[in-house]
Amino acid sequence: MEEVTPQEGQRRVQAGAVLVDVREQNEYDEVHAEGALLVPLSEFEARYAELPTDKPLVMICRSGARSARAGEFLAQHGYTTVANLTGGTNAWVEAGLPSVKGQN
């Protein structure tokens, strides 16, 4: 699976890709990349079909490990344009990209 930098991930999202956050709800509520769609890894196998097959996907988690697993799962289930965001949400925030903090 392709690995992309936060900057490349943002560029792809701006071009129409879907940013998929696979962390759990409490982690997402603390901070997440603006516009990220939450599909927690704990629910991923049951919910992955909610994701579009006709758009590129950029997977994100905290640091990149869980999103890589989710991306591999998608690849095994017929999704062809899936990338993993290297460094995850931590890297996204450190890069100063748009994020949402402290939603309750």
Image: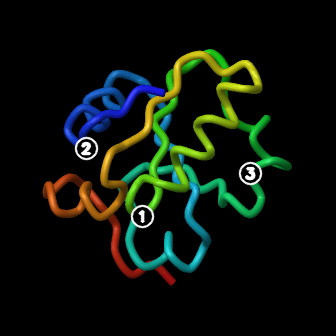
Three-letter amino acid code at disc 1?
Answer: Arg
Q: Residues within 10 Å of mark 2 (few under 14, many from 20)?
A: many
Residue 85 position within the rendered picture, expressed as x and y whole percent measured from the top left: 37, 43
Q: Residues within 10 Å of mark 3 (few under 14, many from 20)?
A: some
Q: State the image quarter where residue 26 is shown.
A: bottom right
Question: Rounded to the nearest whole Å, what is the CA distance between mark 2 and mark 3?
Answer: 22 Å
User: Looking at the image, is 67 positioned above or below residue 78?
Assistant: below
Residue 54 position within the rendered picture, expressed as x and y whole percent measured from the top left: 62, 15
67 lies left or right of 46: left
Q: Earlier in the sequence, mark 3 or mark 1?
A: 3
User: Looking at the image, is 30 positioned above or below residue 49?
Assistant: below
Question: Rounded to the nearest whole Å, what is the CA distance between mark 3 and mark 1?
Answer: 16 Å
Task: Kindly identify which numbered label has been placed on residue 44.
Answer: 3
User: Looking at the image, is 29 positioned above or below residue 37?
Assistant: below
Q: Earlier in the sequence, mark 2 or mark 3?
A: 2
Residue 76 position within the rendered picture, expressed as x and y whole percent measured from the top left: 73, 26
Residue designated by label 2: 6
Residue designated by label 1: 62
